[in-house]
Image (cartoon, coloured by chain):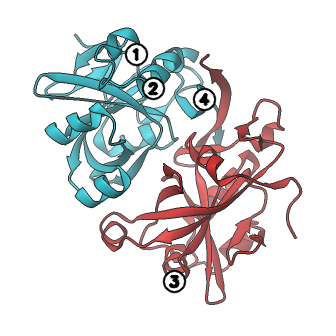
Chain colours: A red, B cyan
Amino acid sequence: MLPDHFTPVPLDKSYRLLNHGPTVIVSAQHAGERNAMSAAWACALDFAPPKISVVLDKATRTRALVEGSGLFAVQLPTVPQAALTVGIGTDSAVTEPHKLVKHGVQLFDAPGLAVPLVAGCAAWLVCKLIPEPHNQQSYDLFIAEVVAAWADERVFRNGHWEFGSAPAELRTLHYVAGGQFFAIGESVLVK
Amino acid sequence: MLPDHFTPVPLDKSYRLLNHGPTVIVSAQHAGERNAMSAAWACALDFAPPKISVVLDKATRTRALVEGSGLFAVQLPTVPQAALTVGIGTDSAVTEPHKLVKHGVQLFDAPGLAVPLVAGCAAWLVCKLIPEPHNQQSYDLFIAEVVAAWADERVFRNGHWEFGSAPAELRTLHYVAGGQFFAIGESVLVK
């Protein structure tokens, strides 16, 4: 079942979901296995078609699922999910097979796509891997095209983030180190 | 002359300067020419040695200087520099040769390195290009190693961002679109 307020974002506006530099959770499934991990190093790469880059360490189980299925989601955790985000970024399914349950991650299916999404996030992008073996091997760098996007319409609507009028708990997280994030802050508009 | 509060950041902590996803200004010089442009798509890529990725459009003059010299700086503009950041991200030196003067950009020399830095920023990273012609041509994606870093010690010291205790005008900017940024907000600590 889809979460409340889950609303499509047009692909030509999807770069705006990542443009302000949020920490993300990467999720994927392959051969009946699902997993999710946090990643601080995700970035928009192109407008049309929209592309992104994300760094996925070789030690992670999620990376193997991305390489297996060629499909993954990037989603933006919110302030109440800070502990969850640290938890699934620290624990690995390689040694903790039940890490998603342990950290309270609730998954739901992306509409029409074989990829799991994490409930409670502010926005979700489903991405199709563009295989670049040299980048993946040398830099752990994965490039993908965004093929679908959604947001919680309370905080992103009509192509704009509305952090000022949305509930404070929908602010995105921006990781530094050692369990410490900053929430996104106030709007600064240049006329 | 170096700005006040300009303090070295150890290379093993330099990824923390970009980890929270700030918009940056990229600066470079080559054959007597200097330029600077804004870039929303910069990202940490590795810890040790520290590496970053940044997207530089083929239409920009700064990209030509980066390709010519193999050296560039990535710096983090602050809230009072929002209009400057939009200005040098919109105007190109190709058609507006005096764009830096027009938008009030003051440059100073990086200590011991042939690269100009932008005054008034919160932090600065000097980066040495790792040539990857396929990425540069196909994706406008540049990979580089961080070889030196500094920060304004009022806002980043002992390896930590101190936005809460620093003057509010030292908060970093996080661009969305259409002249609209968010400043970085409040700390969220997971114990």
Q: Chain of mark 2?
A: B
The answer to whether residue B110 of the structure is visible from this angle is no
Identify the residue shown where x is 62% and y is 16%. Answer: A191
Residue A68 has which mark?
3
Q: How many marks?
A: 4
Q: Earlier in the sequence, mark 4 or mark 1?
A: 1
Query: Horizontally, is B49 left or right of B79 in the view?
Result: left
- Amino acid carrying mark 3 in the image: Gly
Say whether mark 4 and mark 3 are on the same chain: no
Residue B178 has which mark?
4
Q: Secondary structure at mark 2?
A: helix
Give the CA separation, mark 1 to mark 2. 19 Å
Q: Quadrant of residue B108?
A: top left
Q: Which residue is mark 1?
A: B120
Residue B50's place in the image compared with B155, above or below, is below
- Amino acid carrying mark 1 in the image: Gly
Give the CA separation, mark 4 to mark 1. 23 Å
The answer to whether residue A50 of the structure is visible from this angle is yes
Q: Chain of mark 3?
A: A
Of residues B9 and A40, the one drawn nearer to the viewer in this rendering: A40
Residue B90 has which mark?
2
Q: Secondary structure at mark 4?
A: loop
Q: Are marks 4 and 2 in contact (CB under 8 Å)?
A: no
Residue B81 has which mark?
none
Mark in the foreground, 4 or 1: 4
Q: Position of residue B119 (x, y in %)?
A: 35, 16
Q: Secondary structure at mark 1?
A: loop
Identify the residue shown where x is 65% and y is 54%. Answer: A11
Q: Residues within 10 Å of mark 2 (few under 14, many from 20)?
A: few
Q: Earlier in the sequence, mark 4 or mark 2?
A: 2
Q: Position of residue B78 (x, y in %)?
A: 49, 21
